[in-house]
Image (cartoon, rainbow, N blue to C red):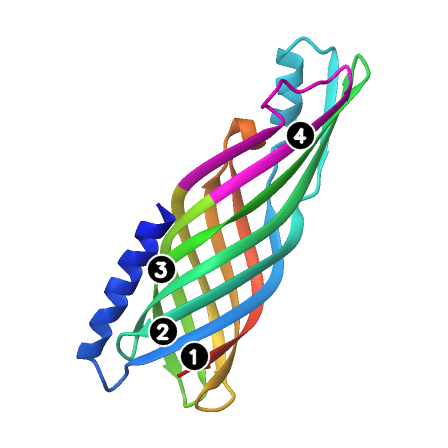
Amino acid sequence: MKKKIVIATFALLGLGAAAPSYAQWYVGASVGRSHITFDNAALADQFLDLGFTSATTTSSTRGTGYRAFGGYQLQKYIAAEVAYIDAGRFQSHSEVTPAGVLTGSTKIDGVEVAAVGTLPIGDRFSIFGRVGAFAADTRTSYMGQGSVSTVTGGDIQERRQTRLSYGAGASYNIDKNVSVRADWSRYTKLGDDFTGGKTDVNLYAIGVVYKF
């Protein structure tokens, strides 16, 4: 699925040859803080449904995320962009009665294909919005202790899916080739009950763009 998305993107980028006045390739990378939402109550309820007498779940919902991207400015206001996103790693910790613990480590990454609309403000500053599709891979590794154990093959759960992505931000041109970018990205409805529940990911990042 990811390979088909990348091939389709570069086919689209090839159309830029019809607009030479604004035709421009660019690459960039950004890093920042990512945030997800674990439904701790739902995770705990799963243990009660299995017959445990009590269960509480806590989780870490913030991590470090990265975005490496490349694109083509099709015309003054529209660009096509493909990116690899590493949204970070997140932990959950469930304690149950009879005494036992289940810890989970969730990692989310994937490839995004998006259209980017840009509005220049003066010679150096611009704002932009982005909407596209995110081919995501959500993987959760589990480890049980005490009364909690994982079945053979059940200690790693993985879910691959393509979901909506969108974002917005602003950029500042340092010179004709280099600019800095600050943006927010949102990746929706990732994972399932086996990976810890569906979640949205928000990534707030700052990066550098180089234009050819």
Crowd class of label 1 (few under 14; some 14 to 19; many from 20; radius 10 Å): some
What's under tag 3, amino acid-wise? Answer: Ala
Q: Can residue 164 be seen in this view?
A: yes
Question: Marks 3 and 2: in contact by CB < 8 Å?
Answer: no
Q: Name the mark on residue 126.
A: 1
Crowd class of label 3 (few under 14; some 14 to 19; many from 20; radius 10 Å): many
Q: Provide the residue span drawn in magenta.
A: 137-161
Which residue is label 3 attached to? 114
Q: Distance between the residues labelled 4 and 2?
A: 43 Å
Disc 4 secondary structure class: strand
Residue at 60% from the left image edge and 35% from the top image edge:
140
Q: Distance between the residues labelled 3 and 1?
A: 18 Å
Q: Distance between the residues labelled 4 and 1?
A: 44 Å
- First in residue order: circle 3 vs circle 1: 3
Question: Marks 1 and 3: in contact by CB < 8 Å?
Answer: no
Q: How far apart are marks 4 and 3 (CA)?
A: 33 Å
Of badges 4 and 2, nearer the viewer stands 4
- In percent of width and height, residue 18 lies at 17, 78
What's under tag 2, amino acid-wise? Answer: Thr
Which residue is label 2 attached to? 118
Disc 3 secondary structure class: strand
What's under tag 1, amino acid-wise? Answer: Ser
Which residue is label 4 attached to? 142
Left or right: 116 with respect to 59?
left
Q: Can residue 197 be seen in this view?
A: no
Q: Relative to residue 122, is residue 112 depicted above or below?
A: above
- First in residue order: circle 4 vs circle 3: 3
